Image: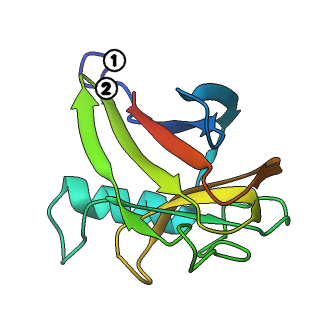
């Protein structure tokens, strides 16, 4: 293959932005920005999506959890996914700008949690996890809101 025939390689990258709004506060404030990792299963699924191979679904669900084990490319689930009290996996708002896909959801809590992880999935209950991040605990209480925004870049 000549240099003229070689194209640029396609790469996926992602960043997680976390915004917190305490009960009684008027607006969200940026809590943290985390560089994430794309899982091995997520890379395979993304390649299948690009080629319309099989029945891969788009990544339109976000989940949060209380797991603390370091994120790894071999992960297929969150460590300890939250499944109640406003922290349930949810259908996200999805949009794009050029080569960046935005997947975001606001969680409105009715109980207290120490949120330490987030993941982007292609199903409401199981599915393939595209990416995951573990971060320092964000202690939320009833009435607090947490906005998770994943920025997935194709470059």
How far apart marks 2 and 1 lie (CA) works out to 5 Å
Residue under circle 2?
Answer: 6
Q: Where does the C terminus fall, quadrant-wise?
A: top left
Please rate how many residues cluster around mark 2, counting C-alpha atoms within 10 Å: few if below 14, some from 14 to 19, many from 20.
Answer: few
Extreme-bottom residue of the structure: 126
Describe residue 138's horizontal placement relative to residue 61 as left or right: right
Q: What element carries label 2?
A: loop
Q: Nearer the viewer, residue 74 or 30?
A: 30
Please rate how many residues cluster around mark 1, counting C-alpha atoms within 10 Å: few if below 14, some from 14 to 19, many from 20.
Answer: few
| Residue contact at pointers 2 and 1, CB within 8 angstroms | yes
Spot occupied by residue 82 in the image (x, y as percentages of width and height)? 63, 74
Instruction: Name the residue: 36% across, 77% down.
Output: 124
Spot occupied by residue 43 in the image (x, y as percentages of width and height)? 45, 57
Q: Is residue 141 above or below residue 24?
A: below
Extreme-left residue of the structure: 52
Q: Where does the N terminus fall, quadrant-wise?
A: top left
Spot occupied by residue 111 in the image (x, y as percentages of width and height)? 67, 69
Residue under circle 1?
Answer: 3
């Amino acid at each position: 293959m000549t240099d003229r025939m070689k194209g640029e390689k396609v790469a996926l990258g992602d960043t997680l932005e976390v915004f917190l709004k305490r009960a009684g506060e008027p607006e969200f404030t940026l809590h943290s920005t985390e560089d994430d990792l794309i899982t091995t299963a997520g890379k395979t699924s993304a390649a299948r999506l690009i080629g319309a191979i099989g029945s891969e679904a788009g990544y339109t669900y976000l989940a949060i959890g209380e797991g603390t084990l370091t994120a790894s490319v071999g992960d297929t689930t969150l460590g300890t996914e939250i499944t109640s009290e406003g922290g349930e996996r949810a259908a996200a708002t999805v949009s794009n700008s050029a080569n960046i896909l935005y997947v975001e959801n606001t969680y409105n809590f009715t109980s207290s949690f120490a949120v330490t992880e987030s993941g982007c999935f292609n199903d409401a209950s199981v599915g393939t996890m595209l990416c995951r991040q573990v971060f320092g605990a964000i202690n939320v209480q009833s009435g607090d809101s947490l906005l998770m925004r994943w920025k997935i870049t194709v470059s």
